[in-house]
Amino acid sequence: MLTGELRSKIDRLWEAFWSGGVANPLTVIEQITYLLFIKRLDELHTLKENKANITGKPIEDPIFTPEQYPLRWSRFKNLDAEEMYRLMIQDKGVFNFMKELAAHENSTYARYMKGATFMIPTPNLLERVVSMISAIPMEDRDTKGDLYEYLLSKIASAGQNGQFRTPNY
């Protein structure tokens, strides 16, 4: 169950997308999902680094090579808006790194990511939502599921907020 504070953070994140020009609820959830996944990749790599430091052995199955370290959430989240946006959208940038992670495999992940599109329209919006997502504690496994349930509930109320209006002719 999400706490009131966590619901409030998610509501502010949702509102940031809305006021930043991303009004389609499905697009909002999709973009949040991509960003959460990118953040989780960095967290998993950090766990592998910690294990390697404790055991004195090399990192097992690293997610990032040393050349790709600038693509890690913990690194790019501190960049200014323009630089962060550039790093996100460039050919060898964060978003394409995420898309191509399993591109050589015939997996469900690879099939879904084949058509993935980065749809955050401005550097300022990206910086705002990255900062907001960084402030959401995701350590508890239940939080992830609760977060998505809450986001999906927002789709159910989307028509009430005008997101799915049809034009009057």
Image (tube, rainbow, N blue to C red):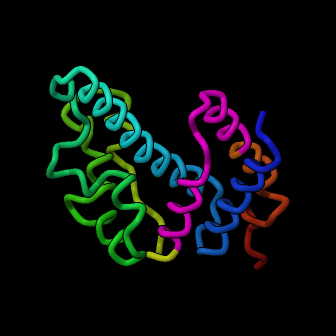
Give the vertical position of 68 relative to 102 (above or below).
Answer: below
Q: Main secondary structure of the magenta part?
A: helix
Q: Residue at x 26, y 35 (%)?
A: 102
Where residue 139 sits in the image (x, y, percent)? 57, 34
Horizontally, is 14 left or right of 96 in the view?
right
| Residue 103 located left or right of residue 158 | left
Q: Looking at the picture, tell me which residue is in the foreground, 63 or 24.
A: 63
What percent of the width, then of the height, locates residue 126?
Answer: 48, 68
Taking 157 as reference, is 149 left or right?
Answer: left
Quarter where residue 9 is shown:
bottom right
Q: Residue at x 36, y 43 (%)?
A: 42
* Residue 153 as seen in the image, left or right of residue 60: right
Magenta-span inclusion, residue 65:
no
| Placement of the N terminus among the 4 image quadrants | top right
In this picture, is 58 found above or below 95? above
State the residue at coordinates (63%, 61%): 24
Could you tell me residue 84's position as x and y percent? 36, 69
Which image quarter is the C terminus in?
Answer: bottom right
Residue in front for this viewpoint, 62 or 102: 62
Which region of the structure is painted magenta? 125-150
Residue 149: say if magenta: yes
- Count numbered badges in the picture: 0
* Of residues 82 and 28, the one drawn nearer to the viewer in this rendering: 82
Q: Quarter of the image holding residue 88?
A: bottom left
